[in-house]
Amino acid sequence: MANKRSGGGLSATQQAAKFLGVSVLAGAVAAGIALPAVGGLGLAAKETAEGFGEIPAVLKRPALSQKTTIYDAEGGVIAVDYARNRTEVPLEDISPWMRKAIVAIEDARFYQHGAVDLKGVLRALNRNAQAGEVSEGASTLTQQYVKNVFVEEAGDDPDKVAQATQQTLGRKIKELKYAIQLEQDLTKNEILENYLNITFFGQQSYGVEAASQRYFSKSAKKLEIQEAALLAGIVQSPTRYDPINDEQEGLKRRNVVLTRMASVGHIDRAELEELRKKPLGLKVSRPKSGCITAELNAGFFCNYVRQEFLTNEAFGKTDKERLARWRQGGLHIRTTLSPKAQKAAHDAATSKVNRTDKVAAAVVSVEPGTGRILSMAQTRPYGTNADNNETVLNLSVGNAMGGSTMGFQPGSTFKPIVAAAAIEKGISPADTYSSGSKTEFDMARFRTCENAPYGTGKYPVGNERQDMSGTWDMYSAIGQSVNTYTIDMLQKTGLCETADMAAKLGIRAATGKRLVGVPSMGLGVVQTTPLDMASAYAAFANRGEYCTPIAIDKVTDSKGNELRPPETKCNRAMSEQTADMVNGILKGVMEEGTGSGVRLGDRENAGKTGTTEQRRDVWFVGYTPQLSTAVWVGGDGTTRPTMFNITIGGQYYGHVSGSGLPGPIWRAAMTGSLQGVEAGKFNPVKVPRGDKGKKDDEDKQDRRRDRDRDRDGDNDNDDDGRNPSRPGT
């Protein structure tokens, strides 16, 4: 060990440092803090000698907090987030004038002295004694760097920051000890590089690169003489010499630095006079941090990415560790967001629903087979200004990821999940069920997971219209959204089996809990999120294999090390045959059912409309083999308005339905997202039909053609369904 003698005692350098601690350090301290008398200096020297050797020999230099950049799938920047606005750069990427300016004004003898500048100490002692107060300090750049390390370690903890900056003898002793060590371990240029990257330059700018961008909108490498002088002058007092808030004070301080540069020979007198006449030349760039500044109207997706990082053990074992890593920054996060799909989703939503409307819309798209979230948009902008109709509530996701506490009822978009569970159990799509427009079901015939009766009494269920009576098979009942058929199917399938299917498809309450099997589940009287519904329908497109949604593709830290992001987990939720059957049934919805008015004409597509009680939530969830998209419209606040006789997006609706508002949004979002993408095909399947159900279906189609099919409605209204929250209700 070069720094120690063979016997393990102090090296010559360290002995000299200890001597300085006895004889000079007290003077250095006195140059930086006020001590009352010579007797006090003697006491300080004694304490210094005793405590100097007890300080650890190695300064733990923390990795500097930097900016984290979030990118879309094509490499475009979505947003930048940071606890401290900083970008580390090597010394060769810092203008030589900046190096000269900071040395000239802060420590002109930097390249001549060691950790302590004895001449500077004596000079400061003399001037402070004459002034009767601390008028001049004697800290070297190395000592200042050490103090900045203490401040960086303190983070945003006000108590720790106070300890790191307090003018006490103990702190000065530590500062000097570590400065001596650094002067042994690093070259002068390395110390200067570290100093210029850690120092605070005011206006939320840490390090010279961030400061150069903030004040002059250019890299530190391109700073001119007078610009470098301005930045160097700010360091001593970032508030007092802030040129943005006080141009005259900033100008005076800049000229002080220029004068100092002339006095040490960096510029001549003629240059000095010319430079002093120049204006500040500020070209201020406002710092942009956080998801509120996100491009592509992707603030909600940006925040989802942040939440995914903070809640996933792939980025740290504990919440504290993950938060510390995020705050440390310097991360480069490549996400799954498709710029094309995001623009299509945002444009589609905002073309039909205004930010000032009583209701809001959310659109989210997922890629089948990968779980990649390609878009996440909504009509209220991301932000905290409620007066401007902004919100930070992500309507597409659950509470843990920044969404609503309870989620939203999916209405009839849940019926395909019941159908999938039924087919998996062996119920044929050709099985028929006959009923009037209203039917009462025996509660005891619904079985719990323990095979016990769900409750007692009757469960009344009604269809949307009085003429919705007859016989249906699965194809016609799902196509026309017949409530009575669905509840009969649920009763035969089982509450537990249906809840299991929902769980396999990733559908859960917004709280993250598993859905509870209740009879009204068949009508979508459960609560979930648009992202869950889009992901579930993506499993149909993927022939029964469900993949968990993901938003992050790749993460690298400030040193270029790759952090392994969470990968999608794909599991079989149902057989390929079951998924093919559901696809065939939902294709029928688009061809001749409630979704026929919004089908995509240039490619195979499937989907389902949905409304809830009193039309508080309206949905359209649909997909092609390449893309699954869920659209929700409803109230996003404490009040959940009913959507009757309401104007949305400048258009009046007698009553809002899944095909009347979310449907057109879905079609526009899908059309834009799939532009230029070759049309895919579902696996061909012939859905078994019941003869009576098929005949009744054809008769109903004839009657429907005699009506105005665009009567701002569809047949998926669940108003007459009841929600038995407990047995006997």
Image (spheres, rainbow, N blue to C red):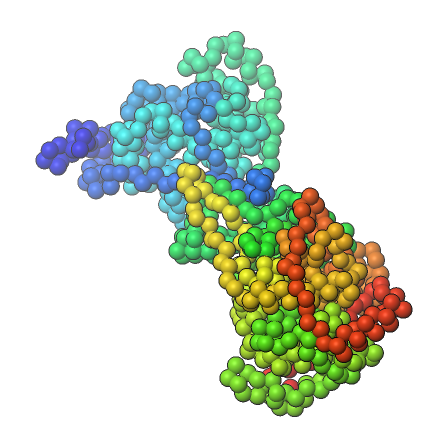
**Residue 624 lies in what quarter of the image?**
bottom right
Q: Is residue 47 left or right of residue 394?
A: left
Q: Is residue 415 visible?
A: yes
The front one of 272 and 192 is 192
The front one of 672 and 624 is 624
The front one of 695 and 649 is 695
* Tally of marks: 0
Residue at the far bottom: name it: 457
**Residue 497, above or below 232:** below
Q: Is residue 357 left or right of residue 395?
A: right
The image position of residue 672, as x and y in percent, is 71, 47
**Residue 133, above or below 255:** below
Q: Residue at x 52, y 22 (%)?
A: 223
- Placement of the N terminus among the 4 image quadrants: top left
Q: Residue at x 71, y 87 (%)?
A: 440
The image position of residue 325, as x and y in percent, is 43, 48
